[in-house]
Image (spheres, rainbow, N blue to C red):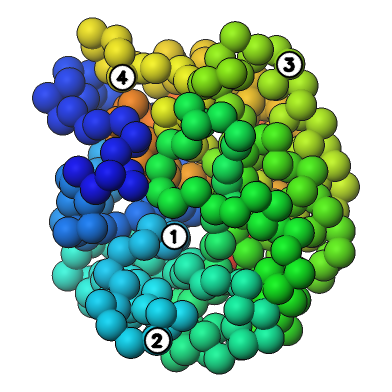
Amino acid sequence: MNKSHAQHIEINKVWLDQHIEEAIDPGLEIVDSHHHLWDKSRTPRYMLEDLLQDLNSGHNIRATVFVECRSMYRASGDPALRSVGETEFANGIAAMSASGDYGKTQVAAAIVASVDLRLGKNVVEVLEQHKRAGGARFRGIRHIAARDSSPEVRVAGPVPPSQLLADTAFRVGFSHLAKLDLSFDAWVYHPQLGELADLCEQFPDTQVVINHAGGPIGIGPYKHQRAEAFRSWQTGLRRLAALPSVYIKLGGLGMKLGGFEFHKRPLPPSSVDLAESWAPYIETCLEIFGTHRCMFESNFPVEKGSCSYGVLWNSFKRMTQACSPSEKRDLFSGTATRFYKLQRLP
């Protein structure tokens, strides 16, 4: 396994297959607002055919959003432009899906690319290259800032520099997103939510979506301080929610970061198990942001180490049973459709 990703929870298909559920409310339209695809960059591979197997879980997945994962970068050329290869790759997958030969789901209907915003004013040409590579599907970028002082909290990928979001060159680069009608996917851990709020307050015209429920940490030094960490996370989200330009993705809690350790159980979790464990986080996000700024995500295949795709979406449906039909439309498809400016679903 690629060492930079070795701390993702290992996927055990035999273990996952021990618990399979029928889809709850199978007609409910879903836009999966966050997933990845990769091949030789890490193990196990997760390409279109693997995603399609998960999509075939009984849920009505109408479209998906591909989010950068350092996949299919160009092997040579200007380092600043190598990530354009990932956008080309994702757009190719999207074109395959749009043929209709792979089912009704519009895979990668929106593409979120990786661009180094520390390029400052020079980022404009890089963003234009991504726009050419992704066409109408290229909707925004993610520049990962997630880091913590504890080495136990490093869960995947290269460690970004400290205070990245406050970096002067980064902010110059960030300032160009709104001008180009591009959004920003923010991946930070919960102690960094204040840093993210500082950034968003300076650039209120830039549409930002917080990834993975704001990264609440439940491992390392936070493992035995869950109540304190929860309060800190909650405070950070409330400050961000005061900005109408900020949205949040509900998910990511099955990563190692969350510390729920479902993968250590003899049997995989049911949707009831997931809902019972995650409800305090999901319900808090809904209370703070409202359904019109919340969207569910699978974060597959990263979450697949903890649960199956069908069970994951059942858990989301269980946690929103008290929501009205219009609120459910927001959470499962409407908010993502608006934020990523998706074309009309089939």
Q: What element carries label 2?
A: loop
Eye-nearest disc, 3 or 1: 3
Q: Quadrant of the C terminus?
A: bottom left
Q: Which amino acid does label 2 sit on?
A: Asp
Eye-nearest disc, 1 or 2: 2
Is residue 62 shown left or right of residue 22?
Answer: right
Q: Mark 3 points at which residue?
A: 228
Is residue 112 shown left or right of residue 123?
Answer: left
Residue at left 31%, top 64%? 71
Viewer-closest of 289 and 306 = 306
- In the picture, the disc for residue 263 is 4
Residue at left 18%, top 51%? 45
Q: Which amino acid does label 4 sit on?
A: His
Q: Mark 2 points at which residue?
A: 78
Residue at left 42%, top 62%? 68
Q: What residue type is labelled 1?
A: Val
Q: What residue type is labelled 3?
A: Glu
